[in-house]
Image: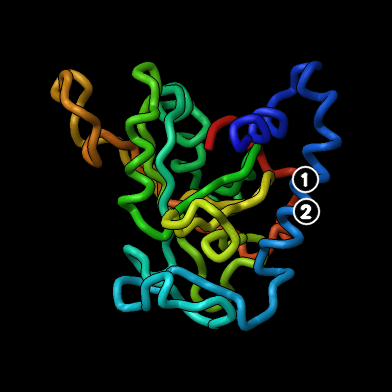
Amino acid sequence: FCSILQEVVRCDTLGVQNHLKSAVILCRALNRNLSQRHRALDELVWPGGPQAPKEPLLSPGVSGKAYSTEAWTTYRVTGMPRDELTQGGFFDRLGRAEAPDDRRFRTKQFLASSFMIDVAFAFLERISADHEAVLFKVRIDPHSKCLHVGYLEKSTSCRGEYEHLYPPFSAFSVRSVVCPTRSAAARGLAPRSLQDCWQIELDAAVDNLLVPHSLPIAPWS
């Protein structure tokens, strides 16, 4: 279901466009029920670092922070074409931009991330051989936080992913882009690991409504 919804949201093909209206209604419903903007103050949950209480010890309705690999940080592992990362590619351009405003972009689809880096790395094996592995580190402002992200652990039937879900067209700013420390030739037939990942560090926008609609759209994220 998730992959079908993502395809409808991000694709421009005619067949997909016939389903776009239904997808938009569903996206709106998810955002209305999950995002921090629409949740009660005592339901907000944020990545609190390794000293925070673990789920399910953090019972529904408790305000505060849940256990995470690092405080105010979530992780996403995905694959994308090398051209998006190397010189002249989308993330290469944003990572090299001097002006902070020129480092901002919006996503084309939902962006799912986890409080736990180990959960994110479980998706490494799903990346096709012709795509580069990318680790996104999403930083959240500990003071202003993020109004449009949703915390799924208390609502999902797929427990244990500790997911922060950003809706389509969420805004981010690129802090840095770091290439892998091990080449494909050096890796050979070994499974991919952290040293084989591009690492892209992002700042999540505090409020999507306060960011220009004209920001570039990332073709992959």
65 displayed left or right of 17: left
Residue for point 18% across, 31% down? 182
Label 1 environment density (alpha carbons within 10 Å; few <14, some 14–19, many ≥20) = few
- Residue type highlighted by circle 2: Ala
Mark 2 in CB contact with mark 1 (< 8 angstroms): yes
Circle 2: element type = helix
Residue found at the far front of this picture: 157
Residue of label 1: 26
**Hey, which quadrant is residue 61 in on the image?**
bottom right
164, above or below 215, in the image: below
Residue for point 69% across, 72% down? 39
6, above or below 95, in the image: above
217 displayed left or right of 112: right
- In the rendered image, the quadrant that contains the N terminus is top right
Residue for point 36% across, 77% down? 52
Label 2 environment density (alpha carbons within 10 Å; few <14, some 14–19, many ≥20) = few
**Hey, which quadrant is residue 37 in on the image?**
bottom right
- Please tell me the numbered disc located at residue 48: none
Residue of label 2: 29
**In the image shown, does 39 or 70 lie closer to the viewer?**
39
